[in-house]
């Protein structure tokens, strides 16, 4: 128990407790009535006219009385548009928010080697599609008539969660027009992976290297900041290929790391989750709070976000990779 009265479990104890169906001590029995994937998942708080890619941590005071009383006792509830939500301890007048599950935040990416002149050069032959299929990856699909005249028959990579690109580069080799340019795997720029630090286990007291381990370029793409609130995994946007191999590796249901087209990444990075702060500023705010205000940092990571990640969104503890070292390096 620390001085704020919060029982602090190590990440291992925490995940073990969850795996055993025991609710984290600091949350009490509140969470046990929530199955993974229920609760605030889904929209319901999307404001018209905005491309809102996150959900707020709403609480239904009637249906979820215990959780409501719990957060009320902590002074962490705020009311917005007639709804009650858990406040972000770092931005107390704002609801805590989480990126939607990948299925609701999925983008159609262009295959490796596609440049600005891709649509002018692609003759819709489908050879890239067959090459990918033949290799057994099925990452590429062809746009149907619903895609409109300009795009029909062109290749896309629509679902990197289930069919990531392995960067085998066969599609670029078979492309007869150079619409998919032959580039080195490292030079591929299909999109950029973005981690939601409020949903990522590694930013909320955990040690998780699952995405970095799945990434073909590992620490060339990923970097870390270590302290007692986690390993704070980051993607270097300029190095990321957008292959999506990290997405399904994430143990958080719906994944805390999503691949976005570069323009969408930049849009989000400029004003992250409508906080008025850039993505980098938001990450720095978390790290600064951890250095300067440990109590607030504990509320954010160990109480609010751990409750949401574990008890509402759900986390598959078996998928958490706790080291970057390989078995050979360990022995
Ligand atoms: S590089 Fe390989 S896996 Fe990726 S889209 Fe092309 S053929 Fe498919
Ligand atoms: S961070 Fe993800 S999308 Fe980017 S190169 Fe690594 S595995 Fe691919
Ligand atoms: S795999 Fe998911 S939880 Fe783990 S560090 Fe990456 S984004 Fe965070």
Image: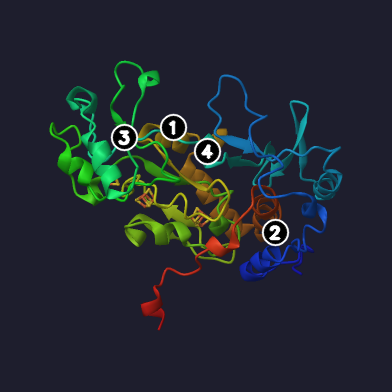
Q: Position of residue 43 (x, y in %)?
A: 64, 32
The reply to whether discs 1 and 4 touch (Cβ–Cβ < 8 Å) is no
Q: Considering depth in this image, is 169 or 313 the residue closer to the camera?
A: 169
Mark 2 or mark 4, earlier in chain: 4
**Which residue is tagged 1?**
267
**Which residue is tagged 2?**
295
Give the residue furthest to the bottom. Answer: 331
Give the residue furthest to the top. Answer: 149
Q: Residue at x 22, y 28 (%)?
A: 118
Q: Residues within 10 Å of mark 4 (few under 14, many from 20)?
A: few
Q: Position of residue 188 (x, y in %)?
A: 26, 44
Mark 2 or mark 3, earlier in chain: 3
Q: CA distance from mark 2 to mark 4?
A: 35 Å
Is residue 190 in view from this perspective? yes
Label drawn at residue 103:
4
Which colour assignment does the render follow?
Answer: rainbow
């Amino acid at each position: 128990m620390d001085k704020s009265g919060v029982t602090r479990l190590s990440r291992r104890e925490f995940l073990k407790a969850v795996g055993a169906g025991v609710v984290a001590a600091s949350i009490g029995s509140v969470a046990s009535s929530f199955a993974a994937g229920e609760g605030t998942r889904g929209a319901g708080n999307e404001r018209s006219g905005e491309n809102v890619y996150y959900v707020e941590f709403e609480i239904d005071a009637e249906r979820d009385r215990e959780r409501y009383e719990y957060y009320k006792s902590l002074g962490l509830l705020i009311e917005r548009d007639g709804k009650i939500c858990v406040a972000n301890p770092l931005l107390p007048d704002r609801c805590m928010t989480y990126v939607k599950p990948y299925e609701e935040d999925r983008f159609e990416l262009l295959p490796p080697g596609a440049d600005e002149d891709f649509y002018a050069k692609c003759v819709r032959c489908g050879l890239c599609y067959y090459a990918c299929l033949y290799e057994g990856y099925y990452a590429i699909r062809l746009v149907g008539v619903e895609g409109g005249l300009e795009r029909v028959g062109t290749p896309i990579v629509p679902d990197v969660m289930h069919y990531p690109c392995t960067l085998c580069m066969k599609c670029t080799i078979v492309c007869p027009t150079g619409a998919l340019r032959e580039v080195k795997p490292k030079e591929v720029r299909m999109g950029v992976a973005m981690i939601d630090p409020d949903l990522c286990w590694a930013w909320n007291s955990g040690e998780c290297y699952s995405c970095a381990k799945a990434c073909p370029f590992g620490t060339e793409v990923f970097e870390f900041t270590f302290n007692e609130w986690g390993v704070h995994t980051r993607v270097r946007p300029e190095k990321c290929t957008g292959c999506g191999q990290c997405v399904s590796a994430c143990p958080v249901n719906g994944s805390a790391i999503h691949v976005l087209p570069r323009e969408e990444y930049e849009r989000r990075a400029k004003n992250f989750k409508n906080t008025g702060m850039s993505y980098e500023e938001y990450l720095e705010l978390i790290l600064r709070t951890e250095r300067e205000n440990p109590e607030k940092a504990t509320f954010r990571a160990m109480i609010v976000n751990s409750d949401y990640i574990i008890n509402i969104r759900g986390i598959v503890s078996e998928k958490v990779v706790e080291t970057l070292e390989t078995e050979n390096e360990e022995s």
